[in-house]
Amino acid sequence: MRIGELSERSGLSRDAIRFYERVGLVESHRSPNGYREFAAETVPWLAYVRTAQRLGFSLAEIAAHGKELREAPDSAAALSALFAEKIAVVDAKMAELAALRRELAERAGTGCPLRPDTGTRRTAARS
């Protein structure tokens, strides 16, 4: 199928499809007249790419794991393993953000909240 049809069927713009092709997420073959021709399997693959992006996977991660997932004997198990890894990354980021929030809350309302020890001095002085 040509890029216009792929765009229509996938809901992606032609520019997005060209970008995905440029970064290696999709392949096309050139017809004798120079048009890009995409395989029918590209439509569900692009739906997968969009879903994976929505779930927080980068295009680099999708590209790195795409071939592996397509060739896996049990793609559900392979996906579950990737999700478990991503959950661990999300948990770590949430912990970092919680620590950052605590520090910001401690420094709010202090004389000079950018001094490294301002929050601890005030707390100690109040006790």
Image: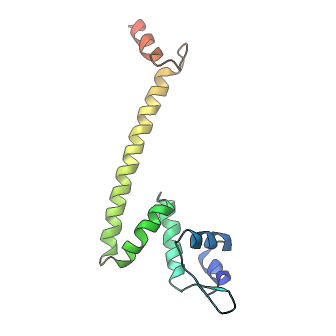
83 versus 68 height, above or below? above
Q: Give the vertical position of 90 relative to 40 (above or below).
A: above
Residue under the point 35% across and 62% down: 82
| Residue drawn at point x = 37 percent, y = 72 percent | 68
**Left or right: 69 as drawn, with respect to 4:** left
Picture residue at 50% right of the left edge, 69% below the top: 49
26 over 100 or under it: above or below: below
Which corner quadrant holds the C terminus? top left
Q: Compared to 102, does 116 lie above or below? A: above
Give the total number of marks visible in the rendering: 0
Residue 74 image position (x, y, % from top left): 30, 76
Q: Position of residue 14 (x, y in %)?
A: 67, 74
**Which residue is more in the foreground, 9 or 42?**
42
Give 14 or 29, whichever is nearer the viewer: 29
| Figure colour scheme | rainbow
Identify the image quadrant of residue 99: top left
**Residue 115 image position (x, y, % from top left):** 50, 17
- Say which residue appears at 47% left-offset and 15% top-offset: 118
Dividing the picture into quadrants, the one containing residue 4 is bottom right
Image quarter in which the N terminus is found: bottom right
